[in-house]
Image (cartoon, rainbow, N blue to C red):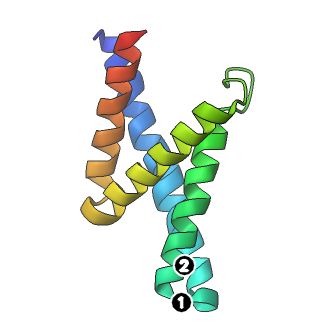
Amino acid sequence: AGVDVLVISAGAGFHEELIFRVGIMGGCAWLLTGITGPRRAWLGALVISSLVFALAHHLGPSGEPLRWAPLVYRTLAGVFFALVYQIRGFAVAAWTHALYDVYVLSLA
């Protein structure tokens, strides 16, 4: 993997986990806890943040065209990263995401 792939992957892993897990998942869980209780709030936040994560990869001029299979795959990836974040914390989720991106970008 070239240095550019490493830099892009590290940046994406850090920033996407910061936005989607810490910001959106954490924010949704916080907002929903008073309405649903902590367990349902966490589950709702996981689903919402994973769907938003998947959809974000299809937005803008460099976004991939919206198709069912990639949307489902990215939603499930969002669920995986959310579980890593919840169980192991932000740093492990960001590193896991970055290493996955290195793998994917190295295939291109």
Please give the residue where the numbered disc 2 appears in the rendered image: 41
Q: How crowded is mark 1: few (under 14 residues within 10 Å), some or many (20 or more)?
A: few
Look at the picture and state if 83 lies above or below 52.
Answer: below
Tell me how many marks there are.
2
Task: Name which residue lies at 37% across and 59% down.
Answer: 83
Query: Which quadrant holds the N terminus?
Result: top left
66 displayed left or right of 88: right
Residue 88 is drawn in which quadrant?
bottom left
Say whether marks 1 and 2 touch (CB < 8 Å).
yes
Q: Where is residue 76 in the image (x, y as percent from the top left)?
A: 49, 47
Q: How crowded is mark 2: few (under 14 residues within 10 Å), some or many (20 or more)?
A: many
Q: Where is residue 33 in the image (x, y as percent from the top left)?
A: 55, 85
- SS class, disc 2: helix
**Pick the front one: 74 or 2:** 74
Look at the picture and state if 44 lies above or below 24.
Answer: below
> Residue placed farthest to the front in the image?
69
Task: Name which residue lies at 57% across and 57% down.
Answer: 49
- SS class, disc 1: loop
Q: Answer yes or no: is residue 11 visible.
A: yes
Look at the picture and state if 108 lies above or below 72.
Answer: above
Q: Answer yes or no: is residue 7 visible.
A: no
Please give the residue where the numbered disc 1 appears in the rendered image: 37
